[in-house]
Image (cartoon, rainbow, N blue to C red):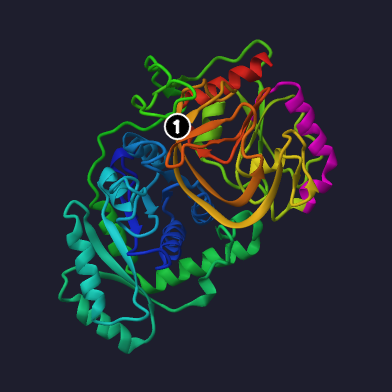
Amino acid sequence: MVTSPPGSAVPRLVVAAPSSGSGKTTVATGLMAALTARGLAVSPHKVGPDYIDPGYHALATGRLGRNLDAYMCGPGLVGPLFVNGARGCDIAVVEGVMGLYDGAAGEGELASTAHVAKLLRAPVVLVVDASSQSRSVAALVHGFVSWDPEVRIGGVILNKVASDRHEALLREAMDSVGVPVLGVLRRAPRVGVPSRHLGLVPVAERGSEALGAVAAMAAQVADGCDVEALVGLARSAGVLSCAGWDAGEVLVPPPPPPLPVPSLGAAPPDPAFGLRARPRTPDGPRRVAVAGGAAFTFSYAEHSELLAAAGAEVVVFDPLRDEELPEGTGGLVIGGGFPEVYASELSANEGLRKSVAELALSGAPVAAECAGLLYLCRELDGLPMCGVLDASARMSDRLTLGYRDAVAVSDSALAVAGTRMRGHEFHRTTVEPGAGAAPAWGMRTPERRVEGFVERGVHASYLHTHWAAEPGVARRFVERCRTS
């Protein structure tokens, strides 16, 4: 057993790999579940913007999966967000993104797994796909160990090993590197998680199948890894000196002047608007409805926490099942997900579509990201949607993917014009037109395009943002609920 230390000293390790597809998710999720089965309170984290892996982490641990993104939130928030998520936990497991040293394009190490590991002062376990190599594995690991001396690779897990003979050859090669082998996992298709056009199929869509997959991952890790050695490695992590992030106690420094609009040129440092918990008004908090269910699974945990800290009562509803918005809804948040997969069901729910349209027409604040944008359109792949926006959406063959440095072009329920935020896009759909008369964002790099819609209280865009980087977004949104 690991005794629970202060949050800033919680034992932790980062599960990384030389490249995508090496088995990070299997190892990280399986380790989380195996540790939880031992009675430990495990804090799950994911490097980068991905929404899907944290769903599997939550299933493995019974706790919210949280993202650590040094691009969207800035390096200075990685430690505080981690400490917040790890409060009261015995150990933390952080799943990396892509290859260990892959970060934001053209930004060096920024937002890479290695960068986050250094910010967390956490040791790294390298998961290596050994399926097509033997002695060469030593050269590969040596290269990753020596590339950045500030990254401490404390052990290796060899994945997709074919046989006892193969394992013996790999271990012999690894003896020359001086990095301990902490696990050997055989090829096991049964732990695989099905993929779709944007990656893994989310937990919410798989039900009992997801439970079975996580259980299989846990069994594979428990059988093939030295779990005690992994816990010992986690306990060697350095102490973090930062305080934990708290949605209700974020400081409020004076905001810097906004950027010129519509200029998308050089910008001052990121604004640091903050938030303090607000007392309830005499008639109670305003209700903010947040879309959930299988069609809208993409949301960062901190968004609802910020809304609640700003004085909102957050109520989750399912657009696939609920025929109207929750009673008393004063604001609506529709995040990302896969509405294209459920277009028929969403279209058939005419009562809810009408309820959403009426709320938007009233001027109440509505924040829609990516999937939410599609849902507010006139149609999606020819099927009627909410009709809030005079735009049409459809699936395409082109994947739009990457971080974005954006500037708010129009005053909205989320931000004043000129506010700079960083986010990411991840979709295989297109919307025509791509921007309204009052666009939501101007992208500063690379193509300097405008995108999204600001109409009445609606802010709809493809851009996913992390509100912890700009807590004033939640405060402004809830204030609009109070006055709408």
Is 235 placed above or below 483 here? Answer: below
Could you tell whether 140 is left or right of 87 in the image?
left
Q: Residues within 10 Å of mark 1 (few under 14, many from 20)?
A: many
Residue, x 30% and y 56% (percent of image)? 101
Viewer-side residue, 435 vs 32: 435
Viewer-side residue, 456 vs 218: 456
Count of number-bearing discs? 1
Query: Residue 92: in sight, yes or no?
Result: yes
Residue, x 62% and y 39% (percent of image)? 434
Measured as percent of width and height from the top left, residue 160 is found at 40, 77
Residue, x 51% and y 45% (percent of image)? 425
Farthest top residue in view: 282
Is 381 placed above or below 197 here? Answer: above
Q: Quarter holding the C terminus? A: top right
Residue, x 37% and y 87% (percent of image)? 163
Q: Quarter holding the N terminus? A: bottom left
Measured as percent of width and height from the top left, residue 230 is found at 30, 61
Q: Quadrant of residue 222?
A: bottom left
Q: Quadrant of residue 126?
A: bottom left
Examine the structure image and report whether residue 394 is included in the region drawn in magenta: no
Give the residue number, with chain letter if any, for mark 1. Answer: 421
Is 323 placed above or below 338 here? Answer: above
Examine the structure image and report whether residue 358 is included in the region drawn in magenta: yes
Q: Secondary structure at mark 1?
A: strand
Q: Magenta region's main secondary structure? A: helix
Highlighted magenta segment, given as a residue range: 344-366
Could you tell whether 85 is left or right of 6 in the image?
right
Query: Type of residue at label 1?
Result: Met
Measured as percent of width and height from the top left, residue 207 is found at 65, 59
Query: Residue 58: in sight, yes or no?
Result: no
